[in-house]
Image (spheres, rainbow, N blue to C red):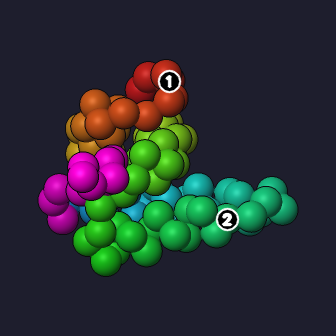
């Protein structure tokens, strides 16, 4: 019997990428809460990244969306790493089509 398909991918792959992913997801969480929305999905993805766990497709979509928003006004030091992480996140399958 074939095991169930696991679409989890370990992102980010470096400390610098983890830092940018953390900043982007935290920013997205704060925007959601400020707008009166539920930020729990962002919190869960943030916890997964901090624990070094792989992200499933939903987590990658969330990270991709958070990175797009974050990179629009990110500190200069985060931009190159953030763009690289965004590209790799998209390569692993997300449904967003925005470009930075």
| Picture coordinates of residue 7, whole percent (x, y) | 33, 47
Q: Residue at x 26, y 71 (%)?
A: 52
Q: Is residue 70 visible?
A: no
- Disc 2 target residue: 39
Image quadrant assignment for residue 91: top left
| Picture coordinates of residue 36, whole percent (x, y) | 84, 62
Q: Residue at x 49, y 59 (%)?
A: 25
Q: Secondary structure at mark 1?
A: loop
Q: Is residue 34 visible?
A: yes
Q: Give the quarter of the figure containing the C terminus.
A: top left
In-front residue for pair 27/59: 59
| Picture coordinates of residue 65, whole percent (x, y) | 52, 41
Q: Residue at x 30, y 61 (%)?
A: 54
Q: Are marks 1 and 2 in contact (CB under 8 Å)?
A: no
Q: Residue at x 34, y 67 (%)?
A: 49
Residue 87 horizontal side relative to residue 65, left or right: left
Residue 30 horizontal side relative to residue 33, left or right: left
Image quadrant assignment for residue 37: bottom right
Q: Is residue 1 above or below residue 34?
A: above
Report the residue that reaches farthest toward the front. Answer: 1
Q: Which residues are magenta?
A: 1-15
Query: First in sequence: mark 1 or mark 2?
Result: 2
Is residue 10 inside the magenta stretch? yes
Q: Is residue 18 above or below residue 7?
A: below
Residue 37 horizontal side relative to residue 10, left or right: right
- Disc 1 target residue: 98
Q: Secondary structure at mark 2?
A: loop
């Amino acid at each position: 019997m074939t095991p169930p398909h696991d679409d989890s991918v370990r992102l980010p792959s470096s400390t610098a990428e983890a830092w940018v992913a953390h900043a982007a997801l935290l920013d997205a969480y704060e925007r959601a809460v400020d707008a009166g929305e539920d930020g729990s999905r962002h919190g869960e993805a943030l916890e997964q990244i901090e624990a070094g766990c792989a992200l499933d497709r939903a987590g990658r979509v969330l990270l991709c969306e958070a990175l797009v928003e974050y990179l629009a006004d990110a500190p200069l030091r985060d931009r190159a790493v953030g763009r690289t992480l965004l590209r790799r996140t998209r390569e692993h399958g997300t449904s967003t089509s925005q470009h930075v």
